[in-house]
Amino acid sequence: MSSAGTLWTIPTQASGKAIRAVAAFGGVAIDLPQGYVHYQDNKKPEFTNKFGHGKIPAWEGKDGFLLFEGSTIARYVATLSPNSGLLGNTREEAALIDQWMHLTESELDFHTTHIRLLLNGNPFPYSKPIHAIFLERQARALKTLEKHISTRTFFVGERITVADIYIATLVQRACISNLDTAARNTVPNLIRHMDTLLNQPAFAGIFGPTPILDKAPVYIAPKKEKDSEQKPKAAPVPAAPKTEKKPKPKVEEDHEDDHGIPEEPKVKNPLDDLPKSTFNLEDWKRAYSNKETRGVGGSLEWFYEHFDKEGFSIWRVDFKYPEELTQTFMSNNQIGGFFNRLEASRKYLFGSVGVLGAANASFISGALILRGQEAEPVVSVAPDWESYSFVRLDTSKDADKAFFEAALAWDLEIDGKKWVDGKNFK
């Protein structure tokens, strides 16, 4: 497939992620510039001659068509896949898509950006009253989005559109910036919409995990220097010959750039202190991936031959609130979101979890193999782990063994409800 053009962006830029996702969903091949250095290359004449404002994201089509501004590029890229439905199916739907994208940019993302800049004290000094105003207006935008999506699967129509992708991207940016647990709890349907969208298989490699902020960041005033008049005066020093100093590079901040958050220092996991086990979880994951699950020479046979019940344990996992589940594909995306939030425990965990039943009459269930004898130390890295129940399985019991094997083979059936879709964590 030939490329439609080049998208000038950086990996952490939110609007750039949205455009890449639109292209991926619509099956449009695009190029990303190799070796692009932001704040340098976009200041060069060869860039500004094409894009007068010198900002990213910017689009350069194979036909020479030039475009900038994130939401505009996203809509344009969607037109390159006219059968995708990304721009709606009627004039009214197209207008509604523009409406929700514009609201999210002008009311949510505008204030998200200015909250971050205000907390950094750059380019304007911190003001607590202004901070409060920005927070109130950001919350108002979130409330409007939450009210609309609370009775719908998607923002416009019955399928994913550019509006869904763009809104989910900018909601994630707000979560990265300042939405703490308390704020997220006020918009549960919007957060679920975000998780559903960002975990679409087509978007693999575009969106990273959404961090959970226990508390919103606060402004920390810089330390004041002591008054120079209180310091003892030093003896005069003869003036040295003047030398020309090189100016320090100016640190600039583009309002459209999302630089992410600093990495947290690594903390040793107490699971690493458990006695060494003869069961190698990575070898099991490879066996499961490369062998048939059941039968002679299958992965289950390998598992029973190598499993160390002292170093590892087996658990049944169930979502506690099946009445909240609607479409089965959304439930499967929820599993993907849960697994995504378990990333920090990847080396201690294997999972096979699925959706059983039909739309508006389904539940989530499956099996986990995890390090140690307790589930909580492994699964509690996911902030929503308490929305699931965990019951230990004993494969010496026929019922527990049958459940475990069926969950791994994806042919589990409970109360007449059959496995319709699922995901593995490996």
Image (cartoon, rainbow, N blue to C red):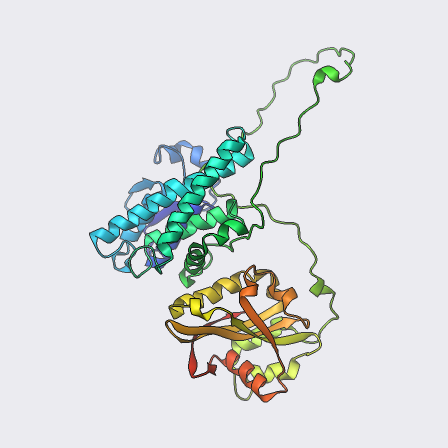
Apparent side of residue 4 relative to residue 348 in the rendered image (left or right): left
Q: Nearer the viewer, residue 375 or 342?
A: 375
Q: Is residue 40 visible?
A: no
The C terminus is located in which quarter?
bottom right
Q: Quadrant of residue 57?
A: top left
Residue lying furthest left: 91
Apparent side of residue 327 relative to residue 260 in the rendered image (left or right): left
Q: Position of residue 158 (x, y in %)?
A: 30, 61
Relative to 342, say whether 355 is above or below.
Answer: below
Q: Is residue 171 visible?
A: yes
Relative to 144, say whether 53 is above or below.
Answer: above
Q: Nearer the viewer, residue 141 or 46?
A: 141
Q: Position of residue 118 (x, y in %)?
A: 52, 34
Q: Position of residue 304 (x, y in %)?
A: 62, 83
The N terminus is located in which quarter?
bottom left
Tally of numbered tags: 0
- The residue that appears at 62% across and 32% down in the rendered structure is 221
Apparent side of residue 357 relative to residue 63 in the rendered image (left or right): right
- The residue that appears at 46% across and 36% down in the rendered structure is 133
Relative to 257, say whether 285 is above or below.
Answer: below
- The residue that appears at 37% across and 40% down in the rendered structure is 106
Q: Position of residue 361 (x, y in %)?
A: 39, 74
Relative to 133, say whether 193 is above or below.
Answer: below
